[in-house]
Amino acid sequence: MVDNTARIKGVGFAVPEQVRTNDAPVFDWIKANPPPHTDLFQGFDQRRILAPGQPLVELMAEAAAAALVDAELGAGDIDLLIGAASVATYISPNDLVALHQTLNLPPRCQVLPLGTEFTIFNDGLVLAEALIRTGRGLRNALVVCGCNWSRHVSYHEATCIGAADGAGAAVMAVTDDPQRFALVDVVTDTDTGYFGAMHMSARPVGMIDPPPPYLAESFTTPLMYIGDEGASSYKEYGAKIPPRIVDRLLRRNGLAADEITLIAHQASSVLSGAWAEAIRPGQYLSTLTEYANMTSASVPVTLAALYPEIARDNLVLLTIGLQQQTSAVLLRRRCARGQVAV
């Protein structure tokens, strides 16, 4: 019997060469004038930062190319490109379209940008698997997430402390390789009561003179914002809800926490520490100290960078977004004959 299961057939990542450490001059101001909520952003030693003028799509193309090599596929094999560049060059279209051009993907390959921010990678895997499972000719999907948030934070605000850049990619494709991870289940939770508590937007800097025939101002580049309400959502939702979602996922699949490897969003050691204590996974993989907070790219970068170190056959990817929204995806591989699960 032919196995037509869609699995993560290949992974890849890319980070910039430039390293920013905790003693970088860009942090001098906030060290001398600590802004509110600095206590929420901890656990970083290094960050990878795009060089001036370096486009984010360059990282995304490098990550995608690595994933294709790992999957033993070419650009012409890809039927769907899904994910997002954040923050994109334009409000629309997303730089995912430029990635399609850069990779020379075929015209039949649809570009499907997602706007769910930090849960994009999980959402992309789930949607790609579902579309492949319909059996309507789509067999190979490329999920790519890129982040350039080091350019989109104020260096007078706490959000700059962990901001880093990177890109991660995965190929979800039909394969009978039991050593590749297949999607088993997903659990999500959304609390729209926190809408706007954290957000990315441009900020007005002054009125245009003379005024045009519509309300208009000049604006900054889009910048991350987290105020008192956002800090509250960080503590009340961000720290407490994701472990409950993972617990629900494990319970309905008959798994104990020590049977899973966990890879999670990397906002701060404040959150990852709370999740580790509450979930107590058998293995918790992180690149927080080395690569810091790559927002929507954190999970795919960590997955690709540490893929050889995954010691459990049950893998949980935990993402959490600005909404506040949480997604926990369970993936599973089967041991080869004669191999004993760790």
Image (spheres, helix red, strand yellow):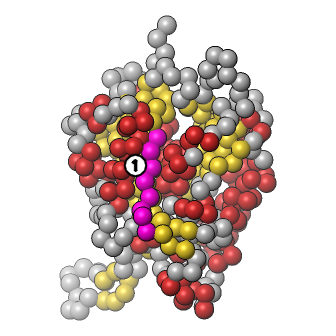
Q: Nearer the viewer, residue 78 or 207?
A: 78
Q: Position of residue 270 (x, y in %)?
A: 70, 65
Q: Is residue 156 above or below residue 151?
A: below
Residue 68 visible here: yes
**Please, what is the dominant secondary structure of the magenta stretch?**
strand
Q: Residue at x 20, y 82 (%)?
A: 213
Q: Is residue 293 above or below residue 245?
A: below
Q: Residue at x 30, y 83 (%)?
A: 218
Left or right side of 67 for 92: left
Q: Is residue 183 above or below residue 90?
A: above
Specify whether residue 176 is painted magenta: no
Q: Position of residue 71 (x, y in %)?
A: 41, 33
Q: Quadrant of the C terminus?
A: top right
Left or right side of 262 for 213: left
Q: Residue at x 59, y 34 (%)?
A: 331
Left or right side of 222 for 301: right
Q: Position of residue 110 (x, y in %)?
A: 29, 39
Q: Residue at x 66, y 45 (%)?
A: 262
Q: Which residue is mark 1?
A: 63
Callout 1 crowding tier (Cα within 10 Å): few <14, some 14–19, many ≥20: many
Identity of the residue furthest to the top in this view: 1
Q: Please name the amino acid that badge 1 sits on.
A: Ala
Residue 188 visible here: no
Specify whether residue 14 is painted magenta: yes
Read off the magenta span: 11-18
Q: Nearer the viewer, residue 16 or 221?
A: 16
Secondary structure state at the residue bearing disc 1: helix
Question: How many numbered badges does the structure rendering display?
Answer: 1
Q: Nearer the viewer, residue 281 or 117?
A: 281
Q: Position of residue 264 (x, y in %)?
A: 62, 51
